[in-house]
Image (cartoon, rainbow, N blue to C red):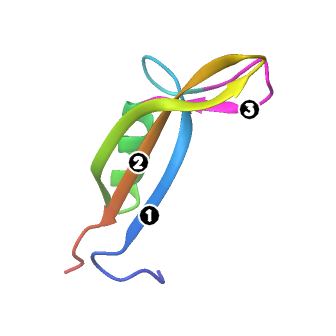
Amino acid sequence: DRARAGALFVFSTEHLEGNGFAIQRSLRFAHSYAYIAEIAAACGFVVEQYDQCKLRKEDGNWLAGGLYVLSLANKP
């Protein structure tokens, strides 16, 4: 419990359609928006912004990614 209300957590993931998460052929995990939003809420965060993007190239092809900005909800 170190973050204060209003704290931001910014990160990216490999994108997964649907729900949950899965390990890819690259041995990296991909996460769905629904999964990130659910885990964030369970930890007291709110998804403030989400954008899909071209995360990086792998074997010459762009990987779909998600960029997230979460904020810590106000504590009572």
For the C terminus, the quadrant is bottom left
Q: Residue tagged by mark 3?
A: 28
Q: Residue at x 51, y 53 (%)?
A: 11
Q: Residue 38, percent across and down? A: 37, 42
SS at mark 2?
strand
Regarding mark 1 in the picture, which secondary structure is present there? Answer: strand
Label 1, on which residue?
A: 9
- Distance, label 1 to label 3, CA atoms, is 21 Å
Judge from the rendering whether residue 66 lies leftward or rightward of residue 14; answer left or right: left
Q: Regarding mark 3 in the picture, which secondary structure is present there? A: loop
Q: Which residue type carries mark 3?
A: Arg
- The answer to which quarter of the image holds residue 28 is top right
Q: Earlier in the sequence, mark 1 or mark 3?
A: 1
Residue ID for mark 2: 68
Dot 2 or dot 3, earlier in sequence: 3
Q: CA distance from mark 1 to mark 2?
A: 8 Å
Q: What amino acid is at disc 2?
A: Tyr
Residue toward you, 69 or 39: 69
